[in-house]
Each structure stands twice: as C-alpha cells, then as structure tokens.
Amino acid sequence: MIEETSTVVNDIDSDKNDNKTSYMRPNILLTGLRRS
C-alpha cells in the first residue's frame, strides 16, 4: 500500500513538472478551480 501511494505521489509530481514546462494553460485551469 505504501508503494502504491508513493507511485501516486510521483505521478502528481510529474504532472506538476509538466505544468511548469507549459505554465500558461495549466495556470488558467488552476485559477478557474480556485475561483470556484
């Protein structure tokens, strides 16, 4: 179970890195989520 959780966390970190690479579009999505 711990290993599975670690894998999920790693996937989330990878998504964050992708967001930094193409920052503008994810930023728009995050702003929309924060407003709602």
Image (tube, grey):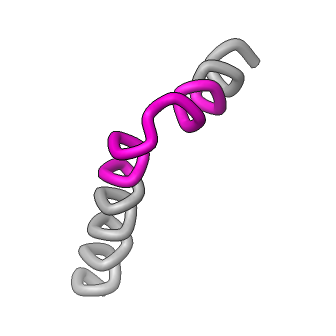
Residue visible at 37% across and 69% down?
11
Q: Position of residue 27 (x, y in %)?
A: 53, 27
Position of the C terminus, as image quadrant, is top right
In which quadrant of the rendered view does residue 8 lie? Answer: bottom left
18 in relation to 23, above or below? below
5 in relation to 23, above or below? below
- Outermost residue on the top side: it is 35
Q: Position of residue 21 (x, y in %)?
A: 35, 45
2 in relation to 28, above or below? below
Does the magenta portion include 27?
yes
Residue visible at 27% across and 68% down?
10
Q: Nearer the viewer, residue 36 or 32?
A: 32
Taken as a whole, is the magenta stretch helix, strand or loop? helix
8 in relation to 16, above or below? below
Residue visible at 65% across and 32% down?
29
The segment highlighted magenta reads 16-30
Q: Position of residue 19 (x, y in %)?
A: 42, 44
Position of the N terminus, as image quadrant, is bottom left
Does the magenta portion include 18?
yes
